[in-house]
Amino acid sequence: MTAQPARLERTGPETTSVIHVSPFKPSLVKAVFRDVTPMHVSRSAAWAAASVTRTLMTEIIDGARKAAAEEARKKLVPGDLLSAIGRNVELDVGNEWYGHSPTFDGRRSRSRKPSAVVGAHRFEAGVKRLLRSRGAAAVPAMVRDLDGIASVFLTQLARDAAMVVREGGLRRFGTVTLAMSGEPAPPPPLDESLRALSARRGDGRTIGRDDILAATMIQLFGGDLRQRALTEAHEATRDTSAG
């Protein structure tokens, strides 16, 4: 029986290393990838994708919790999701879901393309587990939105990972940083080891962990969230093989 990989659990200002099973099962992650690409997805890639998704959704939920706390509410509502995204541009992800939810009416085009919600509604149980782990509860509409965002984000992550495999790395795609007008751009928040993602190694038929990390760099354009997602994905896959 394979040991579960170590995870980083953020419980406050400090971060502690604990054994934590992702609320988003790698088997479901692979199911989303199968809807997008015929490429094989390695075990470490599935764990990395589950970890990145968990990091993102944790940040969204924590932002929504802060908005709810300001109104002395314990149960999260869709308005708290809008507040979290409005306050932190790094959380503005999974945009294809916006056209499928009344929460975002008027915020984005209400396209109803089926491809926008590939894999949607598979992650409701994981979302609920993650909410509980953060000491939060949410109304059904909020759970639906969190589920949809997670599903669409994973779909987009799968598309980008497959593209990285086809293109042989990130050579065609630079890094994106946020800066205020008139201020110098901050240095990229990536350590030297991640520069290796610019040139991919491995066969052209398998999505590996590094392909997920490269896709994460494309999908998460903000500095802090992206770096945390990459760090936690490294931690989550530390004890998994490449297969």
Image: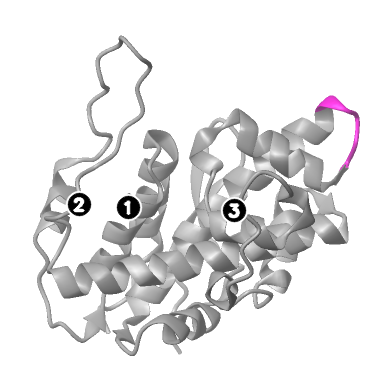
Q: Position of residue 42 (x, y in %)?
A: 32, 82
Q: Nearer the viewer, mark 3 or mark 1?
A: 1
Q: Earlier in the sequence, mark 2 or mark 3?
A: 3
Element on which disc 1 rests: helix
Q: Earlier in the sequence, mark 2 or mark 1?
A: 2
Mark 2 touches mark 1? (CB < 8 Å): yes
How would you classify the magenta stretch by its main secondary structure? Answer: loop
Q: Earlier in the sequence, mark 3 or mark 1?
A: 3
Which quarter of the figure is the C terminus placed in?
Answer: bottom left
Residue at image position (66%, 36%) is: 84
Q: Which residue is mark 1?
A: 218
Position of 147 relative to 207 (above/below): above
Element on which disc 3 rests: helix
Residue range in magenta is 70-74
Residue at image position (13%, 83%) is: 203
Q: Give the residue type that dot 2 points to.
A: Phe
Instruction: Say whether residue 2 is visible.
Output: no
The tag on residue 57 is 3
Which quarter of the figure is the N terminus placed in?
Answer: bottom left
For marks 3 and 1, give the CA distance. Answer: 17 Å
